Amino acid sequence: MRASVVLAGLLALTSAGSVLAQTPAAPSSAPVASDVEVRDASGRPTVRAVRLPSPLRVDGKMDDGVYATLKPISGFTQVDPKPGAPASQPVEVWLLYDNDNFYVSLKVYEDHPERMVANEMRRDAAQNLAQNELITVALDTFKDRRSSFNFYINPIGGRGEGQSANEAQYNGDWNGVWKVETGRFEQGWTIEMALPFKTLRYPAKPVQDWGIQIQRIRRWVNEVDFMAPSDPSRGSSGFMLASKYGNLVGLEAPPPGRNIEVKPYAIGSVTTDRLSRPVKSNDGDGDVGLDVKYAVRQNITTDFTYNTDFAQVEADEQQVNLTRFNLFFPEKREFFLENQGTFAFGGTTSGTGGAAGDAPILFYSRSIGLNGAQQVPLQVGGRLTGRARRYSFGAVNIESKEVEATATPATNFSVMRLKRDILRRSSIGVMATNRSVSRTGVGRNTVAGADATFAFYTNLSINAYWAKSDSEVLKARGATGDDQSYRGQLDYNADRYGLQVEHARVGANFNPEMGFTRRLDMRKTYAQGRFSPRPKVRNRIRKYYAIGSGNYIENGSGRRDFVVGSAEASIELQNSDKFTVGFDQTYEYIPRPFTIAPRVIVPVGGYDYGIAKVTAAFGQQRKLSSSMTLEHGSFYGGHRTTLSVSRGRLQISPRLAVEPTASFNNVDLPGGSFNTNLIGSRVNLALTPRAFVSALVQYNSTAATLASNIRFRWEYLPGSEMFVVYNDQRDSRVTGFPDLQNRSFIVKINRLLRF
């Protein structure tokens, strides 16, 4: 299917979706005109937004007269460390609006402001910002009690935004245009934020009824507070629990406009590549491209991209692989990340955080535009995502260019997703993917499947999927049948107890070439139990953890392939330090020899091995924080010792931090001994909250390479950015300074135009 045909289909679907009206939310019982807040018996607030006669001056000083005349919203409660207790320090909130913006202003009180953890100024540094003092504002603008827009800010101006879906899937790579400033006063800090109505999506009606939640994290004491009471089992991730939000009423939003965003870009580069044929030496190049976003309706968005370029994307952090399975790398390209939760299937996702498990991912967007480590240019693409009544849907169609140097043919990629909400927090759906040319360059590849998620109460969920692939390449080879995959999973995740039970099957010929599959030909049964009590006296210890799990995997003929039993115990301190000891006992059958390191082969056979591990994780309130793990035990008939450092951070100043990572592996096997080491460090320098320099340097002893990625990002206007990027890779096997293998210098600038 050609791109033009599918893009026309997207427009047709848009037109069809536009006639479906959004289910109107029942208006909440509003506070009387003289007040701005009422609460029901459970403590859930209904709050009123107040219209301003003129725009608010957003400077963080909070010296406008409205703050003296309008009573603030307050009454926050804890979910941690004392669930249900009043917040130990008050937060005062004002909700205001005018013709263009919705304003949220806060006075955040703190009796020890000198102890606050505020050491990240970069925008969108979500993982680090989450370890700071933080305010998060969540808006469920369609009042579906499932999804929300999220905006977060720390005391020194570090900020970010994201979208949550189905109360569990968070996408921190949605980039909205908004303004925020912070300030200080004697008893704490202040926030003034302006959220343009053009940035938000909401029903087309004059008076809005939204869900709203505001979260406050006091990181230096690990206290988590909410404006509307949330569930303790979710802790700081409770900002995604849209079913627990308060009600926001009285907001008279402007009628939806055209909401067209056009972002053209221009790029110039100089490249040297001594490994290519012919060799490149300071070859200059330049190009232009265009992204367009059009809100057909407030809840239906169409994206188009032409000649898409991802040169500004940060480099992958390398991984050590001592297994025979593929490594999972998260997606980092903006076009694929926005609304990514729409394409989550069967309880799996290919988000930016975490790795993939044994269950396949049907749509793994890194299969588009990448052939191994080689970039494949994208010619044109389109995407449609949105909601209509109880349905959410997504469609993607992209055409890649032919690359003669790597014999990569032009390929069309398409994905369709449809999901229907049922009951209170459950859904059923279908999904299909199509790749016009397989990875081998012959024949097409399609996959179709159905999934269901049932959520009961707050902590119990059941999800399941079934999928089938159709691969012309496998058919030509005579491989037919056994081309299906399914899974059923039950998950109970409460504060004190947890239980997960799973059964999954992946056929030997299941072949989702637009997805990610870690292992084929397997039948898996898995169970995990958790006991995590809180001590009665919570002075130093926040929580205890005891976790046990068992994983049994056999192939389609019933042969035992992989069995592992795991046990671990942890203590988490109130200052967020955590200490863990654990042991894994594993049996693994190797059906064919595989190369684990150069000139070291693991032969066919069954192997029993056990690994003991100790982990010490130190919180970011410390000047030097990290998670350090030491592992030692038997391994494929020999022994392995591993020392790894992750999430390392040395805070030099609020603007400058060094984030080291390392993995040292000493392996002694019957087939040979080897060491494999991976050492890296990221250096982050925040010039302002909207401009920073980030450098990632990595040394890999196995590949004998030293790689560098240096990025300067400047948001010179809201939504408009300039990037300066330097990349190089060097051969570390030579004596002296490593020899250059390839190098590039790139300058890219884009400009956001809103209509």
Image (cartoon, helix red, strand yellow):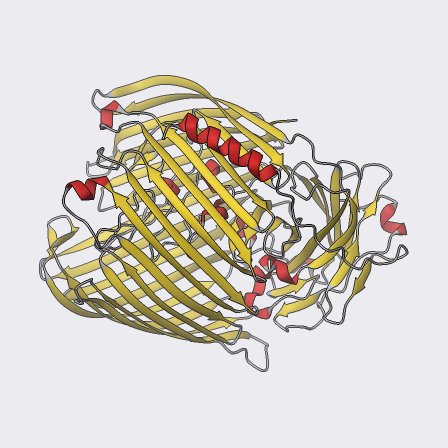
Q: What residue lies at 37% left-to-right and 21% top-to-bottom?
A: 270
Residue 166 appears in the rendering: no
**In-image side of 441 versus 216 (left or right):** left
Nearest to the observer: residue 135 or residue 17: 17
Task: Please name whichever residue, 386 or 176, is drawn nearer the observer in this view of the structure.
Answer: 386
Looking at the rendered image, the quarter that the C terminus falls into is top right
Provide residue 62's location: percent of width, then percent of height. 80, 46
Compared with 724, 101 (above or below) is below
Task: Relative to 217, say whether 7 is above or below.
Answer: above
Q: Position of residue 38 (x, y in %)?
A: 81, 63
Counting labels gives 0
Looking at the image, is 30 positioned above or below residue 330? below
Which residue is at a point 30% across and 23% down the rendered structure image? Answer: 272
Q: From the top left corner, tell me how far across and down residue 50 is, in percent.
A: 83, 48
Residue 545 coordinates in the image, percent (x, y): 45, 75
Can the viewer see residue 634? yes
Q: Looking at this rendering, what residue extends furthest in the bottom direction?
A: 536
Tell me the quarter of the picture where residue 240 sits.
bottom right
Up-down: is 99 above or below 615? Answer: above
Name the one closer to the observer, 382 or 376: 382
Image quadrant holding the N terminus, namely top left
Q: Residue at x 82, y 56 (%)?
A: 72
